[in-house]
Image: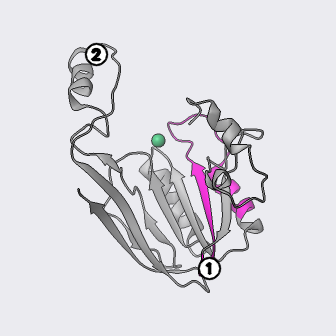
Amino acid sequence: MWDKREIIEYMQSVPQDSHERPRRLIRPANYVAGTPGYGVYEGELPGGQWYAVINLQGRVFMASNDDPFRTADVLLETIKAKVVLVDIHAEATSEKMALGWYLDGRVTAVLGTHTHVPTADDRVLPGGTAYQTDVGMSGPYESVIGVQKELVLQRFLTGMPGKFEAAKGDPRMAATLIECDGRTGRAISTQRLLLGE
Ligand SMILES: [Fe+2]
């Protein structure tokens, strides 16, 4: 997200307690202190249901973030909403699954992102937290995780560097639909979706 520097100004254009659009764009909550933007958003749906969204980033195979587990603990102490969605952006399936168990019974859902490939392990954990290791990519599926397949193949076949371009074919949207109890925040069911054109 830092590739486009103007995003920093956008994120800082509203105060922390705002509910406007720029405040609803979040980045990992466990980035080092002082990073622009916020890692959690708490808001109200038109029907009056309060909810919170937390974004965390893993540490396995990734740049140095603060501890996502302890960061979640700290954030959950301040969040008033019962319905809480945690997006764990991480490389290692083990780290995402460990966070799912760590937060089971304390949040509505722990959903993994980053690997682009939806995993078939969506379920509701015993404590009432919906969990899926990776929701998957929304984008062109005639590709290698979103990139033109010829360019990726060329790199694997030759080892030579080259510019990656986004692919265009076979757009699909990967999503996970979670039903929950708005009063307790506990998940009732979860369902994987992969919608084609
Ligand atoms: Fe990523």
Res. 132 image quadrant: bottom left
Q: Using the image, tell me which numbered label, if any, was put on residue 29.
A: none
- Quick one: quadrant of the N terminus? top right
Q: Earlier in the sequence, mark 1 or mark 2?
A: 1
Q: Which residue is mark 1?
A: 49
Q: Foreground residue, 95 or 185?
A: 185
User: Which stretch did the figure color magenta?
Assistant: 46-75
Determine crowd level at label 1: few under 14, some 14-19, many 20+ residues with C-alpha closer than 10 A.
few
Rendered residue at 34%/15% (across/down): 161
Kind of residue sitting beneath label 1: Gln
Determine crowd level at label 2: few under 14, some 14-19, many 20+ residues with C-alpha closer than 10 A.
few
Rendered residue at 26%/31% (across/down): 148
Res. 176 image quadrant: bottom left
Q: Is residue 162 left or right of residue 71?
A: left
Q: Which residue is mark 2?
A: 159
- Disc 1 from disc 2: Cα separation: 51 Å
Rendered residue at 54%/85% (across/down): 181
Above or below, 161 relative to 21: above
Residue 55 coordinates in the image, percent (x, y)? 59, 54
Q: Is residue 193 left or right of residue 197?
A: right
Magenta highlight on residue 50: yes
State yes or no: discs 1 and 2 in contact (Cβ < 8 Å).
no
Magenta highlight on residue 84: no
Kind of residue sitting beneath label 2: Gly
Q: Is residue 21 left or right of residue 93?
A: right
- Quick one: quadrant of the C terminus? bottom left
Q: Is residue 38 left or right of residue 2?
A: right
Q: Foreground residue, 45 or 142?
A: 45
